[in-house]
Amino acid sequence: DGLANLIARFRPGEVSDKQREAQYSFTPNDIRRAIINRELVLHHQPKVTTHSGVMRGVEALVRWQHPELGLVPPSNFIPMAEEAGIIDELTDWVLETALKQLRDWHARGLTISVAVNLSAKSLSTPDLADRIAAVTSRIGIEPKYLLLEITETAVMSDLALSLGTLARLRLKGFGLGIDDFGTGFSSMQQLSRIPFTELKIDRSLVHGASEKPHLHVMLQSTIEMGKKLHLTTVAEGVENPSDWQLIRLLGCDVAQGFYVSKPVPGDALAGWLKQGTQHLRPQRPSMG
Ligand code: C2E
Ligand code: MG
Ligand code: MG
Ligand code: MG
């Protein structure tokens, strides 16, 4: 549709014209085949503590390594997978792959956590919490190393329905993150009813906030709210030194964004490990 294309055009480099044309021509079977043919891949984006720059975890982000189109971003096939009712198959693949990758990192001494995104549709599946617990124990990962991210708008669209699944996940010991916070309209009262452990503040409140007073105020009060609710606060979209310096000043706990690292294939993280570092940020001279 027109708006999506317009938005895509303002993110140069993320989506090629070829991919944009193909956006609506995927069928559910294309995605099933992609899973079977091992065309889906995960990239991992580091999340670092703002006080030391140490990587404590990564977010696993799915891409489709399409034989003709190249690397297709998730926005081009996740909505279709949700509509076609095959998002659970995709989620299962992402969970299994992310957890196996994590087991490998742990075996090499990189004891980080991994975050996986859940779609709103999955939250209403009654057995989701059990399925996640089953795959985690089968692969041999402690629940505290897996964090599930759910967007603010997804949770709030049907709070009653999501609440049961989220509570069960939390009781089993998994981390729960509220994603893209600031794009919806949830109140502190609503938020306090859900057992979240992490508040991920949307890029739209983070990037450029040092030059825009209204963003600065919203960012500051969102971080304060997160702290009052005893949540780990994470800033998304930290793209440059000013973003980085501001969130540190405001006391945000964790940073994620291109300034720290883009999402990278699993081998790249293993490469950093070989260099003996989980410290991504302090090595850059521009750090304040
Ligand atoms: P998200 O969960 O909010 O993930 C963060 C998105 O922001 C990623 O886009 C990441 O590449 C991008 N990003 C990170 N740092 C920066 C930055 O500094 N600047 C800018 N401009 N962007 C940044 P990506 O990988 O295209 O994913 C888009 C969305 O697709 C994700 O948003 C998530 O909602 C969804 N998604 C990705 N993987 C999965 C998955 O396995 N399952 C489900 N259900 N959704 C997924
Ligand atoms: Mg996310
Ligand atoms: Mg997000
Ligand atoms: Mg987002």
Image (spheres, rainbow, N blue to C red):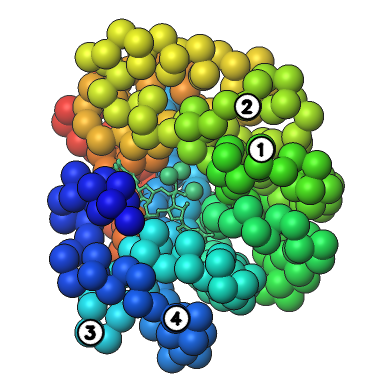
Q: Which mark is residue 259?
A: none
Where residue 7 appears, as percent x and y from the top left, is 26, 46
Helix, strand or loop under label 2: loop
> Is mark 4 in CB contact (under 8 Å) with mark 2?
no
Residue carrying label 4: 27
Q: Which mark is residue 68?
A: 3
Ligand 1 within 8 angstroms of badge 3 C-beta: no
Disc 1 crowd rating (10 Å Cα; few below 14, some 14-19, many 20+) is some
Residue carrying label 1: 156
Q: Is residue 174 left or right of residue 41?
A: right
Q: Is residue 43 above or below residue 59?
A: below
Q: Is residue 276 above or below residue 246?
A: below
Name the residue: 63% across, 53% down.
120
> Is mark 1 in CB contact (under 8 Å) with mark 4?
no
Q: Is residue 229 visible?
A: yes
Where residue 63 appears, as percent x and y from the top left, is 38, 68
> Is mark 2 in CB contact (under 8 Å) with mark 3?
no
User: Who comes first in sequence, dot 3 or dot 4?
Assistant: 4
